Image (cartoon, helix red, strand yellow):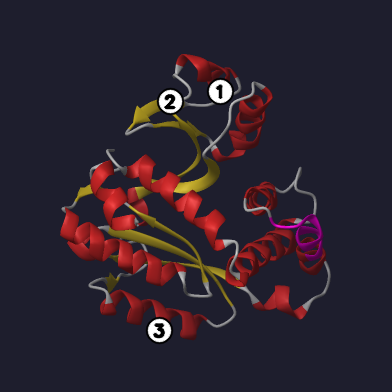
Amino acid sequence: MSGHSKWASIKHKKAIVDQRRGQHFTKLARAITVAARDGGGDPEMNAPLGNAVQKAKDASMPKDNIERAILKGTGAGADAAAFEEVVYEGYGPGGVALLIETLTDNRNRTAADMRHLLSKRGGTLGQPGSVAYLFNKRGVILVDAARYTEDDLLVAIEAGAEDLTTDDGIVEIVTDPKDLPAVRAALEEAGIELEGAEVTQQPTTRTTIDEETAEKLMRLIESLDENDDVNEVHANFDVPADVLERVAG
């Protein structure tokens, strides 16, 4: 698992920096709108919407923007109706499995984009089901291990977390997706500062890659992230944290 939690932390910090670009807020708003369309506008009763709203808040998205996105989803807006969630599966450099979550209003365009970006950066687009079995949807909270020990974080277990592990300076707290809000709230109430918290696709097995391959993989993931239709990219790579920091910097 070396480096995987570190990558999640780096990705979270990159998202906060990326908020300065309009594209990031646009993606967050789109995710909120689709979640509200599919499950209603109450974040307390609609878990996907609650997760999307919390992710937007973590990125300092203005409250007005969040409320407008919810209203667009619960209304009769053509924008909301046009978008659908499509997951693409494939492989990156070194045989790393990739699960690419998109929100698109044109499946053909997005599929062509994914195929082009993967082939350009040393990957391939797979068939549905080719890698999805290698991931489980979990809630994941990250905490700085230099500031808190696992004993400090036992409040998370009491609130329903399933596991705590420390790796490369990061404590990773794993929950059932539905329990993530309660565990997060318990930690924040205890004064614990979080490095990140989200519902994600967690790998069940990981592929070990070297520094050269890791650099190629990071370039591919960045290219995918920059696509307007891509909402999230999950990968099952394993690389030492010091190598990851060099190639992700």
Query: In the rendering, which numbered label is found on residue 112?
Result: 3
| Label 1: element kind | helix
Tag 1: Cα neighbours inside 10 Å, few (<14), some, or many (≥20)? many
Q: Distance between the residues labelled 1 and 3?
A: 43 Å
Say which of marks 3 and 2 sits in front. Answer: 2
Instruction: Name the chief secondary structure element in magenta.
Output: helix
Circle 1 sits on which residue? Answer: 156
Q: How crowded is mark 2: few (under 14 residues within 10 Å), some or many (20 or more)?
A: some
Quadrant where the C terminus sits is bottom left
Disc 3 marks a residue whose amino acid type is Ala
Image height check: is 192 above or below 80?
A: above
User: Is residue 195 in the magenta section?
Assistant: no
User: Badge 2 is on which residue?
Assistant: 164
Left or right of 86? Residue 235 is left
Q: Is residue 58 above or below residue 25?
A: above
- Image location (x, y in percent) of residue 56: 66, 54
Taking the spot 59% from the left edge, 80% from the top edge, the residue there is: 105
Query: CB under 8 Å between callouts 2 and 1?
Result: yes
Are circles 1 and 3 on residues that touch, CB within 8 Å? no
How far across and down, in percent of the image, does residue 75 sit?
83, 69
Place of residue 167 in the rendered image (x, y in percent of width and height, measured from the top left): 33, 31
In the image, residue 144 sits, relative to residue 43, either above or below, namely above
Q: Give the range drawn in magenta.
A: 61-68
Spatial CA span between label 3 and label 2: 40 Å
Q: In which quarter of the image is the N terminus?
A: top left
Q: Is residue 136 visible?
A: no
Quarter of the image holding residue 211? bottom left
User: Can the viewer see residue 129 in this picture?
Assistant: yes
